[in-house]
């Protein structure tokens, strides 16, 4: 290797005496020999490989074990390529190969839309690793290392990740996790609101325009995750409002991974929604075969979130399907005209389902001023209750709204109240006699929490038990218009869009 290589230790390894472990794991990853403790510690901030000649065999072993990275340093000049990502790993997952192919050609800035986070791979294991300061520092260090690996620098907007916007850091603990995790699913699936898009667009514009990019990459916003959809909408809002600054540079919308695998039909619907408004996009496919293994390595640097070997199969499936047969590719879409942002419901992964709900809502909206009563029956978590409540009261300004919730979800409604909204226990005897009251029914969710996330976020079919329960409920509440939905955000998102 040349003298421009820096050796840097991955930040998720921790040393106790001679023993090195991965984060809070009890398993020993590495036992350091005599004289290796000082070497291991020195690599936290990076050391030029030329200064480690006597240790090079050991360095190579640690590189093969994924304990250190050998990072080339590039001298670049000129206007930068700016790549915007919702979270500190999305570029690596979605456009990492494309980025590696450009390594060393020009300055590159990765701009992440969120910084503070408490999300880690320990969530699925039920381990106590929720400290937001600790997780944020770790994720920032991983992301800085991954950016350096790709020849880029990292910049972060000082915004919290979605779970910390949903509930503050001090409320997350092993005891509260399942309860909060349950309610987080509909929060993540809620469409971005105009005020949030406006605020993020302003933040992005302040950063991006000052960088004066020669090229801009933004997410296409595939999937149901609010941060991906919000980042796309804010980026396009920024581009429209500063079109004189962006019209002359290449703008690519990359396909979000892993959502591009989870929702294979969404891409065509999104492209059609833009095309219907005269927005031209051209597919831009690059062969990443020569850097695919490096992309997997880059992704594996984010080990606090996932293991590279676990991500590799889906990365390969996506790469095999993104370009010509027999190649490993990444696909993005080049913006060829001034963008027009379609309604959020047309860009959602379940756009056809939302279109049907919108059809059912039409007569409700037509008489929204005269409607005097509305019933909401919540068979599952609410999610962003303050936003949902405000949308309902704004959409139906003269209606008294009865919201029936399970005992397990009552805590969600304590964060917002309104004189026209009454939250009641889930007992429906009084409702049986209310003829004609428009009623929203949120699917009952008796299945395990991970499957609930799949139904609410990944849009898998409703379990048979819920189908039977809702058929019975429909019979108990006759002679009234009813809308059944996955979560209340489906209906409220449409109301915010159409009223």
Image: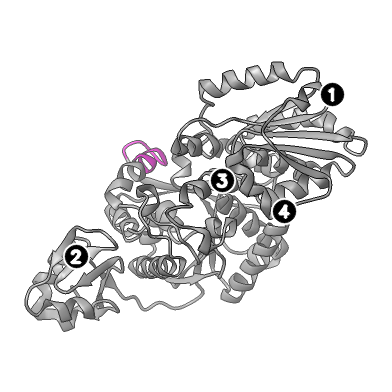
Range covered by the magenta-colored residues: 317-326
| Residue that extends furthest to the bottom in the rendered view of this protein | 51
Residue at numbered disc 2:
63
The image position of residue 342, as x and y in percent, is 70, 45
Q: Earlier in the sequence, mark 4 or mark 3?
A: 3
Residue at numbered disc 1:
436
Is 365 situated above or below 434? below
Residue at numbered disc 4:
416
Q: Residue at x 41, y 48 (%)?
A: 330
**Front label number (3 vs 2):** 3
Quadrant occupied by the C terminus: top right
The image position of residue 156, as x and y in percent, is 51, 70
Is 97 situated above or below 17? above
**Front label number (4 vs 3):** 4
Q: Earlier in the sequence, mark 1 or mark 2?
A: 2
**Magenta stretch contains residue 370:** no
Left or right of residue 339, residue 120 in this image: left
Q: Earlier in the sequence, mark 3 or mark 2?
A: 2
Q: Residue at x 36, y 70 (%)?
A: 148
């Amino acid at each position: 290797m040349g003298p421009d290589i820096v050796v840097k230790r991955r930040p998720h390894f921790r040393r106790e005496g001679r023993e090195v472990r991965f984060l809070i794991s009890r398993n020993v990853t590495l036992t350091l020999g005599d004289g290796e403790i000082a070497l291991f510690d020195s690599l936290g901030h990076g050391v030029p490989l030329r200064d480690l000649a006597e240790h090079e065999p050991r360095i190579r072993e640690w590189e093969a074990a994924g304990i250190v990275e050998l990072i080339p340093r590039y001298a670049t000049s000129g206007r930068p390529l700016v790549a915007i990502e919702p979270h500190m790993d999305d570029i690596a997952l979605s456009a990492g190969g494309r980025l590696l192919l450009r390594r060393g050609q020009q300055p590159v800035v990765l701009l992440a839309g969120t910084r503070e986070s408490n999300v880690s791979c320990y969530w699925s294991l039920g381990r106590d690793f929720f400290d937001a300061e600790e997780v944020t520092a770790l994720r920032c260090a991983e992301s800085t290392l991954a950016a350096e690996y790709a020849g880029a620098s990292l910049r972060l907007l000082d915004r919290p990740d979605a779970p910390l916007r949903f509930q503050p850091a001090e409320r997350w603990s092993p005891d509260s996790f399942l309860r909060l995790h349950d309610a987080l699913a509909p929060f993540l699936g809620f469409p971005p609101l105009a005020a949030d898009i406006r605020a993020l667009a302003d933040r992005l514009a302040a950063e991006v325009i000052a960088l004066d990019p020669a090229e801009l990459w933004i997410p296409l916003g595939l999937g149901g995750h609010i941060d991906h959809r919000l980042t796309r909408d804010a980026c396009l809002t920024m581009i429209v409002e500063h079109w004189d600054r962006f019209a002359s540079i290449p703008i690519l919308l990359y396909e979000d991974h892993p959502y591009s695998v989870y929702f294979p039909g969404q891409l065509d619907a999104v492209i059609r929604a833009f095309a219907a408004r005269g927005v031209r996009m051209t597919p831009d496919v690059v062969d990443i075969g020569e850097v695919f293994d490096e992309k997997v390595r880059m992704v594996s640097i984010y080990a606090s979130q996932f293991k590279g070997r676990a991500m590799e199969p889906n990365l390969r499936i996506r790469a095999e399907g993104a370009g010509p047969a027999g190649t490993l590719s990444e696909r993005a879409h080049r913006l060829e005209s001034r963008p027009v942002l379609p309604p959020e419901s047309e860009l959602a992964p379940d756009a056809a389902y939302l279109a049907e709900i919108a059809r059912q809502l039409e007569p409700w909206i037509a008489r929204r001023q005269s409607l005097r009563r509305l019933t909401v029956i919540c068979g599952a978590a609410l999610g962003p209750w303050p936003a949902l409540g405000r949308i309902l009261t704004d959409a139906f300004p003269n209606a008294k709204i009865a919201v029936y919730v399970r005992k397990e979800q009552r805590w969600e409604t304590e964060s917002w109240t309104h004189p026209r909204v009454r939250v009641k226990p889930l007992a429906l005897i009084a409702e049986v006699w209310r003829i004609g009251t428009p009623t929203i029914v949120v699917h009952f969710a008796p299945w395990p929490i991970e499957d609930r996330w799949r139904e609410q976020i990944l849009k898998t079919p409703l379990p048979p038990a819920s189908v039977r329960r809702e058929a019975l409920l429909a019979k108990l509440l006759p002679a009234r218009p009813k809308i059944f939905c996955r979560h209340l955000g489906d209906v409220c998102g449409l109301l915010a869009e159409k009223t």
